[in-house]
Amino acid sequence: MNATASLVFALFALVLVTSGAWWVLRQPFFPIAGIKVDGEVTHNNAVTLRANVAPQLKGNFFTIDLARARAAFESVPWVRKAVVRREFPNRLRATLTEQVPVAHWGDEATSRMVNGFGEVFEANVAEVDDDLPRLDGPDDQAGQVLGMYRLLAPQFEPYQLAIEELGLSSRGSWHVLLDTGAILELGRGQSEEVLARTQNFLRTVKQVAAQYGRTVAAVEGADLRHNEGYALRMRGVTTVVADPKKK
């Protein structure tokens, strides 16, 4: 009986102490006195970040929800990732990683970008280098589109050509807009198939254009979706034969 009574008393005391400690921790005795922001901060400054995030933080130093605090920081434009931790005795430290855009995403009317991980994010395009290419396709395939761009772009460089836009249709067909204004229909298939068709085009288009007294810059468009060949459209070149009766 004595042992049971002692155990009950000990449990009661533990609950009482725990409840008391929790009550004390929830009181406004431990307010957060400051927020330290560090990390890769280029498009934001610490003052603006604190002003945007502080109103969303609830609780004191011990009771604040760090997961919600992290989400608050990551909701700020240009912030990709935030690591938030307590810093004794009364501060929070947020270490931020900002988005690094590698391409515009979608229609020109939007303000979306793609980072190096193939993630789409909102951004102020006025702060972005105009030389970045534009990629387009279903949002959930942004990584695939970025991967295809990284595969194809180096193929054009030896020919003094550059991809300005690369798109993937909802039906899985690829198309490219070059810096010369030429539009290339690359068709569907695995990346190796698309790459092979592109390489074949680049190896031969200069010679084909030369047969008509033109350079690659005269190419307006090409359709690479044909087996063992492609259709070519060039400025000033037509296959239509004039009707002598109309002369």
Image (spheres, rainbow, N blue to C red):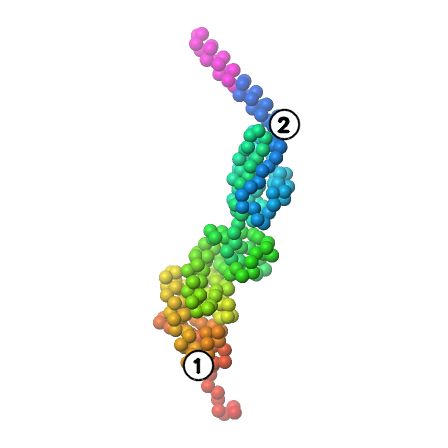
Q: Which residue is mark 2?
A: 28
Q: Position of residue 181 (x, y in %)?
A: 51, 70
- Find numbered disc 1 in the image and state the secondary structure of the residue it sits on: loop
Answer above or below: position of 147 versus 227: above
Quarter of the image that includes the N terminus: top left
Q: What crowding class fits label 2: few (fewer than 14 Cα within 10 Å), some (14-19), or many (20 or more)?
A: few
Q: Does 14 lie within the magenta span?
A: yes
The overriding secondary structure of the stretch rendered in magenta is: helix
Q: Position of residue 242 (x, y in %)?
A: 48, 87
Q: Determine the residue positioned at 57% across, 35% down.
A: 92
Answer above or below: position of 190 versus 18: below
Say whether disc 2 or disc 1 marks the residue closer to the N-terminus.
2
Q: Are marks 2 and 1 in contact (CB under 8 Å)?
A: no
Q: Amino acid at mark 2?
A: Pro
> Which mark is nearer the camera, 2 or 1?
1
Question: Which stretch appears magenta?
Answer: 1-15
Q: Determine the residue positioned at 41% across, 80% down.
A: 211
Q: Position of residue 107 (x, y in %)?
A: 55, 60
Answer above or below: position of 141 versus 22: below
Q: Amino acid at mark 1?
A: Tyr
Answer above or below: position of 50 versus 184: above
Q: What crowding class fits label 1: few (fewer than 14 Cα within 10 Å), some (14-19), or many (20 or more)?
A: few
Q: Position of residue 202 (x, y in %)?
A: 41, 70
